[in-house]
Image (cartoon, rainbow, N blue to C red):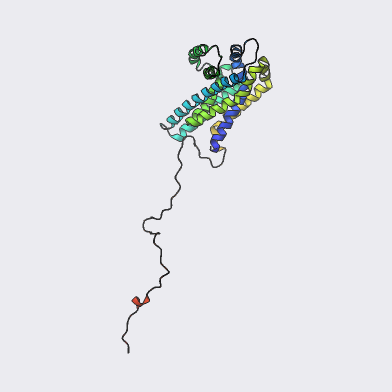
Amino acid sequence: MNSGTALDLMVAFNLGLASQVHCVGMCGGIVAALNIATAPRGAVTPLRYALAYNGGRILSYALAGALLGAVGGGALTLFDREIGYRVMRYAAGAILVLNGLALAGWLPRGALFEGLGLRMWRHLQNLGRGLMPINTTPRALAFGMVWGWLPCALVYSTLMLALASASPWRAAAIMAAFGAGTLPALLASFWLGNRAAALFRGRALRLCAALLLIAAGLVTPFIDRLLPGMHAGHAGHGAHSAPMQHSNDMPGMDHGQTMDHAQPMDHTQHMHHHPAP
């Protein structure tokens, strides 16, 4: 793993942590419904189900990231690679900043783009209903994969970062790191219910999350320039110049032949024979 990928993963994980404030409000209703479906009569949702729900959700994030990473990589083959890479980075950063401003309340909620994908979600909801009742771990995993496609502006923001990576594997890792960052709040919601919502909805915490999103957006366009020695546009440039090879077969010079100093030079061939007096 190169330093650029590690930095992208760190940014994505911190975006997930910052998104927890938003996630509790956005997914709280789903968590409550899953609690009823999985653990009726006030019982606690089994850990294996909670992990399966969230594992399926993160798997969907990774699949979406891989798809967009492939799209980004393909787009760079059609345009100047460096310019295309920069454009995608700046777009990802701008969307992160907009979401941070909206989360802080400094922009209207419409800036969160949560309507994007709502039409697809209406169809996927039927798949989720078909998995009820959730009484096995595979069903919980499958429902989690459906849940992962719930329209969410912060997921879309991170998907822009995945798109800018221009690599399916790297993009999938970015989205998995984002999903891992959202785990604390959503796992807590399964067992703490409304208390988790109260914990994550504080104004101060929301403002900190918004500032983190804004900072991530400002950093994203220049992330490959923050570490010395990184190749600008590394996501789109898979190959670097090959090192110079020193060959023994350079024209005009035969390094394979060496002078044999072991044998004495026969000077007699170069002597002029004069007749004896």
Figure check: 123 above or below 18: above
Q: Nearer the viewer, residue 209 or 70?
A: 70
Q: Is residue 93 visible?
A: no
Q: Residue furthest front?
A: 136
Residue occupying the point 62% across, 18% down: 46
Q: Identify which residue is drawn at 51% across, 28% down.
A: 172
| Location of residue 82 in the rendering, given as x and y in whole percent from the top left corner | 46, 35
Give the quarter of the image for residue 103: top right
Q: Is residue 232 left or right of residue 260?
A: right
Q: Position of residue 221 (x, y in %)?
A: 54, 32
Quarter of the image for the C terminus: give it. Answer: bottom left
**Residue at the left extreme of this rendering:** 275
Q: Image quarter for residue 77?
A: top left
| Residue closest to the eye, 166 or 61 | 61
Residue 124 in the image: state x and y as whole percent.
49, 14
Question: Is residue 23 among the parts visible in the rendering?
Answer: yes
The image position of residue 112, as x and y in percent, is: 56, 19
Residue at the bottom extreme? Answer: 277
Instruction: Report the number of numbered marks.
Output: 0
Left or right, 262 with reference to 145: left
